[in-house]
Amino acid sequence: MPDSKESEEDRLIARYFRPLATDPGAFGLQDDAAILTPPPGCDLVLTTDGVIAGVHFFPGDPPDHIGRKALRMNLSDLAAKGARPAGFLMSIALPGTIEESWLSAFTAGVADDAQHYACPLLGGDTDRTPGPLSVSIAAFGTVPHGKMVRRSTAHAGDCVVVSGTIGDAALGMRLRGGAPDAERWRLEPRLRAHLEQRYLLPQPRNALAQAVLEYASAAMDVSDGLAGDLAKLCRASAVATNIDATRVPLSDAAHAAVAADPGLIEIALTGGDDYEILLTIAPEKLTAFSRAAKRAGVAVSEIGRLVEGEGVRFVRDGKTLSFARPSYSHF
Amino acid sequence: MPDSKESEEDRLIARYFRPLATDPGAFGLQDDAAILTPPPGCDLVLTTDGVIAGVHFFPGDPPDHIGRKALRMNLSDLAAKGARPAGFLMSIALPGTIEESWLSAFTAGVADDAQHYACPLLGGDTDRTPGPLSVSIAAFGTVPHGKMVRRSTAHAGDCVVVSGTIGDAALGMRLRGGAPDAERWRLEPRLRAHLEQRYLLPQPRNALAQAVLEYASAAMDVSDGLAGDLAKLCRASAVATNIDATRVPLSDAAHAAVAADPGLIEIALTGGDDYEILLTIAPEKLTAFSRAAKRAGVAVSEIGRLVEGEGVRFVRDGKTLSFARPSYSHF
């Protein structure tokens, strides 16, 4: 009889995805749709981003990292907008070769992060695909009405600030992909592991979101390389900046790699997958913001100032750096 | 310089996707995120569904139909929940072989529908993929607070109602896929075209959403076959029903096919892609609902009643139909 049989898809959803749907608005994934209602006086902030095997991650990457990464890419966008996570929808296309043990590890990673970041699964879509595994997530957050921090609202005179360190993931991807030049960096295992881990598992700065909301004049997440993303922000806000590249915060590992091969600074500044926050802030608010960031446990660095005009330049030792490809694109 | 160069992805987004982002909350697709704020007293209804080439559509299907179909699948979910469309996010993975003329036709179809259904593009994600083309959409609608029409709230005694006609798309898919038995149906070209068109281009019943919201005790969209979907609704609501299969509304084309091959009734009742609304309704409200449906220009048919108990049976000529596979699954 029709009702005595659950499809394979229904079984997998019940077993692996339903435990993540802890919000009452998800109806246990047993309806056509979910409900989400921002608190009174709040806007809902929406973003979507996804990963495709062989494009955004190596097919052999640990499954729990793949799930976390897909969610964290979206959480990073919410953080940069000053939004508090509220939930997400996840569409997953599985090749026939994927085993249940993979799915189990994948969803365990997502479940951990959903709980840690207070961002429950609200709904989804599961399909088989003849192509590579892919995960597409739409994530939702809340901000006080009209307060989403935008890219286009920076002013000349504002300080340019980034969270964390820049370039680790781009260098880590080269290590992980076995780029032939990476052996020349002669990194000790600890530093090598740091870069690879930064590629595998972004650390979205949601702890900083409240401070961004309170103090930033503009912000965006750094996901396609600092140089290109800063250029986007400046273009959107019709301002310019000259950045002293030595002020861009690098990890010990990235410093060591760049010391071994100075040309790597271009990879660090233009590679993708940083998932840090780039923000601009009026100078008189910088101290209060830095204090709030410290309380949130997130390192932040001022890397320059915005000026009137057009264009973004990175300068080192008095020379303007010229980049072959300013912005990383998976496209 | 970084800011003088737009990536290929940025160029395609600006050219083909930005014109669809007519809502101010989309910020012209020039920010990390969009904003959506349900009207005061309303909940946001969220759903996600997508299509993969070779799984949900034939790779040679017209590109504007593929885009419309991906959006309409989601609009159908919103309609079944009694929700008014508010916007959508679209993630698209493009193989390298896709040409701009394809993308132009695809987005033209989506743009038309976005306008027709008052459901603007709010944001998206565009990637290249080594796999088949895929489109994943997350769509949003609004309902008065607490009023989303659910699957689990039907009662014994309620009438079972479906919109439109059932089975056309499943038969149309067999025609379009060149199923060897389809020649035996001997359909005249007009009827054949009707079934194929119903497969290619769903007609979501958003015009019926307000009446569903006002009168239905429970509802869902029929996308995986009437038999399996009705079983899901009955299971969620802990009720049962016996349906006289001759009361299920069929188009002239489906009637002709089933007359030529009576076994096709199983395809009609269990095939997918109907995108009609299945709803239950207290008998005393049926007349008012039917009147509202007529005003909305959507045909509706009562096909049976809910009873206490468990299970869904379809009966024809006094015999219970038995289905090899009650529910269609792309999985």
Image (cartoon, coloured by chain):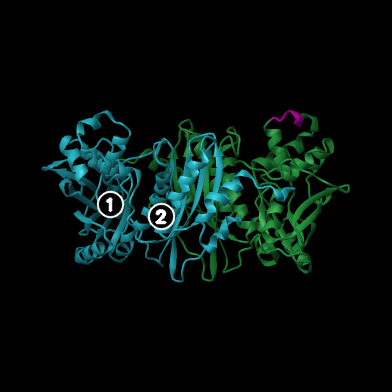
Chain colours: A cyan, B green
Q: x, y percentage for residue B101?
A: 50, 35
Is B263 located above or below residue B216 in the figure?
Answer: above
x 76%, y 30%: residue: B181
Q: Badge 2 local density, few (<14 within 10 Å), some, or many (20+)?
A: many
Q: Is residue B179 magenta?
A: yes
Marks 2,1: beta carbons within 8 A: no
Rendered location of residue A240, percent (x, y) = 23, 51
Is residue A271 at least partly visible in the picture? no
Q: Which residue is mark 2?
A: B33
Classify A222 as above or below A143.
Answer: above
Q: CA distance from mark 2 to mark 1?
A: 17 Å
* Residue B232 drawn above or below residue A135: below
Extent of the magenta region: B178-182
Furthest toward the front, the residue is: A101
Q: Quadrant for residue B68, please give it.
A: top right
Residue type, mark 2 in image = Ala
Q: Residue at x 75, y 54 (%)?
A: B311
Q: Residue at x 61, y 67 (%)?
A: B147
The secondary structure type at the circle numbered 2 is loop
Residue A117 is situated, as x and y percent measured from the top left of the image, at 40, 58
Q: Are marks 2 and 1 on the same chain?
A: no
Identify residue type, mark 1: Cys
Q: Which residue is mark 1?
A: A234
Q: Is residue B267 magenta?
A: no
| Mark 1 residue element | helix
